[in-house]
Amino acid sequence: MKRLTRAELAERVGPQPPSDAFWNRVIAAERGTISVGPEVVGDTDRRERENRRRRGESGDDGPLSPGDMIDVGEKSFVVIAVEETESGGRRYRIDRVEERADTQ
């Protein structure tokens, strides 16, 4: 499990990291999806990807994996699922993590 700040995530999923508008929508909805292309995942060999799918094997998760945390200011999100796209990219579904009440 990795814990990343918004800036660290932007470095991993570039060249088009999630924008301010994206994060504002995700924070309001408490969930969202981050998509990256095959060049970010490193899955650019179409033939290899098709053979892997025929064998029923999944590919590398890419820059994020289930359970990874993303901190956006005071809010935190967790990657709950990774989906592989036909082109070899990935979609990362994220949900907001409820804040813990301090117990003293």
Image (cartoon, grey):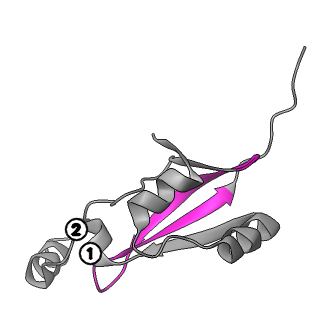
Q: Nearer the viewer, residue 41 or 98?
A: 41
Q: State the image coordinates of residue 92 (x, y, percent, origin top left).
A: 49, 66
Q: State the image coordinates of residue 31 (x, y, percent, origin top left).
A: 69, 66
Main SS of residues in magenta: strand
Q: Nearer the viewer, residue 52 or 102?
A: 102
Q: Nearer the viewer, residue 22 or 95?
A: 22
Q: Quadrant of residue 43?
A: bottom left
User: In the rendered structure, which amino acid carries the disc numbered 2?
Assistant: Gly
- Residue at 69% across / 68% down in the picture? 23
Task: Please identify the quadrant where the N terminus is shown.
Answer: top left
Queried whether the magenta region covers residue 94, the answer comes back as: yes
Q: Is residue 88 left or right of residue 102?
A: left
**Which residue is identified by label 1?**
39
With respect to residue 71, does 93 lie above or below? below
Q: Nearer the viewer, residue 11 or 83?
A: 11
With respect to residue 70, does 35 lie above or below? below
With respect to residue 48, does 3 lie above or below? above
- Residue at 75% across / 70% down in the picture? 24
User: Which element is circle 2 on?
Assistant: loop
- For residue 42, the mark is 2
- Residue at 42% across / 71% down in the picture? 83
User: In the rendered structure, which amino acid carries the disc numbered 1?
Assistant: Glu
Q: Is residue 3 left or right of residue 39?
A: right
Task: Please identify the quadrant where the C terminus is shown.
Answer: top right
Q: State the image coordinates of residue 46 (x, y, percent, origin top left).
A: 14, 84
Q: Quadrant of residue 53?
A: bottom left
Segment tinted magenta in the rendering: 73-95
Q: Measure the C-alpha gap from mark 2 to mark 1.
A: 5 Å
